[in-house]
């Protein structure tokens, strides 16, 4: 198992009730798998699935990116009144 | 002057304009995103912005680098406000210099579109009727 730190912002933080949590995940777990774990723990997060960006150590990553010990993970919903057109430019949706 | 900044202080375009202006560039475009008193026909009382600052600053820098690969532009500065904003306050400044105006306008719009779509910065609408809602 490895330990990762998850940061929560905005609506996610309101749902989870904390700005940060530490999770133990399987070796080679992906960010997408970690998201599914979180959705199971906090079903209200499910509404964000499919319109989410993933970041590891402050860098955008693909959903299939593998996690490593002490990684800092963030789940970033597109933001700030962005339009559908602007969202079309987003590289990775999960 | 930090060209890329997340700050809780009110934004002032003057130092950004001074920073990007060089003798090589004949055009300086300043875009200001301003807190508006309505969204989707519903009255807004104020806005609150939150950022993942450790990530937002490098991401803003990256958007400027992307613009440089697409247009011939000079210096670029982007500042984004966080915290509570009253109506009329500036939430974001995108300031771009270029030899000619066409490139400066296009690069500024491109950077703003990228901020809207990707920057880890969140807006919370404080509606006039008292409701509070993250725009995510």
Image (cartoon, rainbow, N blue to C red):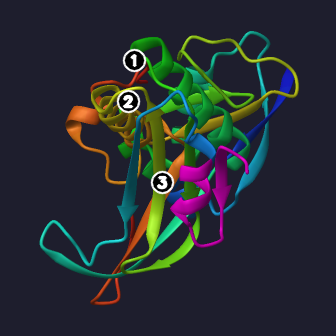
Q: Work out whether residue A37 can be spotted.
A: no
Query: Under tag 3, what secondary structure?
Result: strand
Q: Is residue B83 above or below residue B80?
A: below
Disc 1 to disc 2: CB gap under 8 Å: yes
**Which quarter of the rendering shows the N terminus of chain A?**
top right
The stretch of residues the image draws in magenta is B1-18
Disc 1 to disc 3: CB gap under 8 Å: no
Mark 2 belongs to which subunit?
B
Q: CA distance from mark 1 to mark 2?
A: 7 Å
Q: Which residue is rendered at x = 32% and y = 53% of the image?
A: A81
Q: Is residue B112 above or below residue B100?
A: below
Q: Which mark is residue B107?
A: 2
Q: Which mark is residue B71?
A: 1
* Of marks 1 and 3, the one in the foreground: 1
Q: CA distance from mark 1 to mark 3?
A: 19 Å
B49 displayed left or right of A22: left
A3 displayed left or right of B44: right
Q: Which residue is rendered at x = 58% and y = 36% of the image?
A: B22
User: Looking at the picture, how far across and down is residue A71, in whole percent?
Assistant: 80, 27
Viewer-side residue, B118 vs A55: B118
Q: Which mark is residue B93?
A: 3
Whether B120 is among the magenta residues is no
Mark 3 belongs to which subunit?
B
Whether B5 is among the magenta residues is yes
User: Looking at the picture, how far across and down is residue B135, in whole percent?
Assistant: 37, 58
Name, please, the residue furthest toward the front: B23
B58 displayed left or right of B101: right
């Amino acid at each position: 198992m490895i330990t990762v730190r998850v940061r929560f912002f905005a609506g996610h933080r309101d749902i989870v009730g904390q700005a940060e949590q530490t999770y133990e995940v399987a070796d080679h777990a992906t960010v997408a798998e970690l998201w599914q774990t979180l959705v199971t723990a906090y079903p209200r997060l499910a509404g964000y699935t499919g319109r989410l960006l993933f970041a590891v150590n402050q860098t955008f990553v693909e959903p299939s990116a593998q996690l490593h010990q002490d990684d800092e993970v963030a789940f970033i919903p597109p933001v700030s009144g962005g339009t559908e057109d602007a969202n079309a430019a987003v590289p990775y949706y999960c | 002057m930090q060209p890329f900044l997340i700050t809780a202080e009110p934004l002032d375009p003057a130092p950004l304009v001074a920073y990007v202006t060089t003798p090589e560039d004949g055009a300086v475009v300043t875009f200001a995103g301003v807190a508006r008193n309505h969204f989707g026909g519903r009255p807004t009382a104020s806005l609150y912005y939150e950022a993942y600052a450790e990530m937002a600053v490098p991401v803003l820098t990256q958007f400027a680098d992307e613009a440089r690969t697409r247009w011939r532009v000079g210096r670029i500065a982007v500042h984004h406000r966080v915290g509570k904003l009253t109506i009329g306050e500036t939430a974001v400044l995108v300031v771009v210099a270029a030899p000619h105006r066409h490139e400066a306008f296009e690069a500024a719009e491109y950077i703003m579109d990228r901020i809207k779509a990707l920057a880890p910065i969140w807006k919370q609408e404080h509606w006039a009727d008292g409701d509070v809602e993250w725009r995510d």
